[in-house]
Image: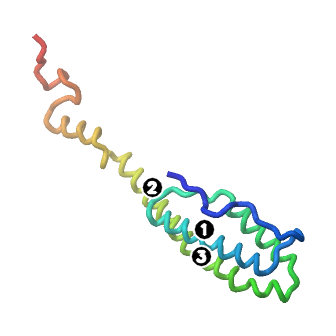
Amino acid sequence: MTRPPSAPLSPVLSQEGTDSAARLAERAVALGATLDDARAQAEAGVLIDLAGLEDRVARLCLAAETLPRGEARTLLGPLGDLVAALGPLAAALTEHQVRREETIAAALAGRDDPHTARQRAAAAYGRAGTPGGPGLPDDTP
């Protein structure tokens, strides 16, 4: 199951066309919540859709660059929190991918597949996987 990021992808600009430092901090916190939600979903084994995430981060950074230096410095904490959230998300995504690859490898090797397990069991008992096949008496009159 794929679940999109919980926050909207488009930034909300103030009436003047630029964001204030406070609004950008709010956007950073919202984006951080999206990253935390994505991490939790990945840890739970849910397929997640991170489409638009890079664009959201880029727009946030571009908006922060338009602020006067003093105001932009107030964003160091919220932006630093975003950077810190990326490590656990990356680790969760990596672990999720490893689990998926192991599941696929197991399926390809015939483990955990009831159909293949029936075929192996039938072969072990000298029977074909279909009724009336070699090794089974034909029940038809």
| Residue 27 point in image, percent of width and height | 71, 73
Foreground mark, 1 or 2?
A: 1
Q: Residue 107 vs residue 83: left or right?
A: left
- Label 1 vs label 2: CA separation? 25 Å
Residue kind at label 3, given as amino acid type: Ala
Q: Secondary structure at mark 1?
A: helix
Badge 1 local density, few (<14 within 10 Å), some, or many (20+)? Answer: many
Mark 1, residue position: 34
Please state the horizontal and vertical placement of residue 81, each as a whole percent of the image.
Answer: 64, 81
**Residue 101, which numbered label?**
2
Q: Position of residue 69 (x, y in %)?
A: 86, 86
Residue at the image point whose x is 40% and y is 56% from the top: 102
Type of amino acid at the residue the image marks with label 2: Glu
Q: Type of residue at label 1?
A: Thr
Q: Quadrant of the C terminus?
A: top left
135 or 103: nearer the viewer: 103
